[in-house]
Amino acid sequence: MGDRAGRTAAETAAAVRAKEVTPREVVAECLARIERLDGRIGAFRKVRAEAALAEADAVAARADLAELPLAGVPVAVKDNLAVRGESHRDGSAATPDTPAAEDHVTVARLRAAGAVVVGLTNVPELCVFGTTEGVFGITRNPWDTSRTAGGSSGGSAAAVAAGLVPVALGNDGMGSLRIPAANCGLVTLKPGRGVVPAGIGHGDWFGMAENGPLATTVEDLRLTLGVLAGGTDGPPAPEASPRRIAVAL
């Protein structure tokens, strides 16, 4: 098998479903690229090498492999979302280094679709800045490492733009997906209230934060968003409280 760097999530999943390549081979190549390139980019706070390979083998053993929309696709997760067995630090040394007991629902949906979580991506302190630098290091723009990848989903954006993973999970309250996508030349969107489960806990910008994907192509964005949304196009969630509008004449 040749190097699959630059292959989209859709292409990778199709190859895995067709058994042209195994999930372990895909994830192993992904981990090798991370080891080779991330030292100068700083996209990841934590790389889950052993766990990811074991999870890739579990995907390969699934009876429904041929039906999985993200079969064997390596994904990265922003470090403010729970990944089972890993701590999520929100870019701060003041947060507890306690492994999560369960996946966030968005992470669980990615796994159910056949994706393999290879690591947690770097964020600024408490995810409140439009650049990504802090106690866990600086995330640089893969196109020009003298410039920022943006924030606060900067690590996720840099990982995708550098070809370390084809898609990544981030979130956006006031531009935290859109800013790094613009900086790194990616496609993303803030899905809209209630489309994708939110619930990121503290730092959710008073309920404005929404989870969403970062990708290099619109097809990968559509594919991953469909998984995150649970394959349904439900109505928007109701407002948490009534909003008053004043009009002066």
Image: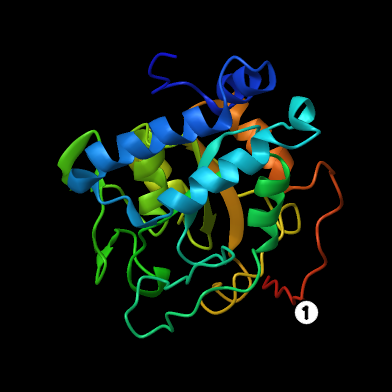
Relative image position of residue 49 (x, y in whole percent): 41, 49
Indicate the colouring scheme: rainbow
Relative image position of residue 130 (x, y in whole percent): 34, 60
* CA neighbours of label 1 inside 10 A, class few (<14), some (14 to 19), many (20+): few
- Quarter containing the C terminus: bottom right
Which residue sits at x=26%, y=53%? 139
Q: Which residue is mark 1?
A: 241
Can residue 41 be seen in the rendering of this structure?
yes
| SS of the residue under disc 1 | loop
Residue 61 horizontal side relative to residue 184, left or right: right
Task: Look at the picture and state if 19 lies above or below 63.
Answer: above
Amino acid of disc 1: Ser
Relative image position of residue 73 (x, y in whole percent): 56, 34
Task: Look at the picture and state if 244 lies above or below 186.
Answer: below
Task: Look at the picture and state if 5 lies above or below 92.
Answer: above
The one nearer the camera, 239 or 163, is 163
Which residue sits at x=64%, y=64%? 103
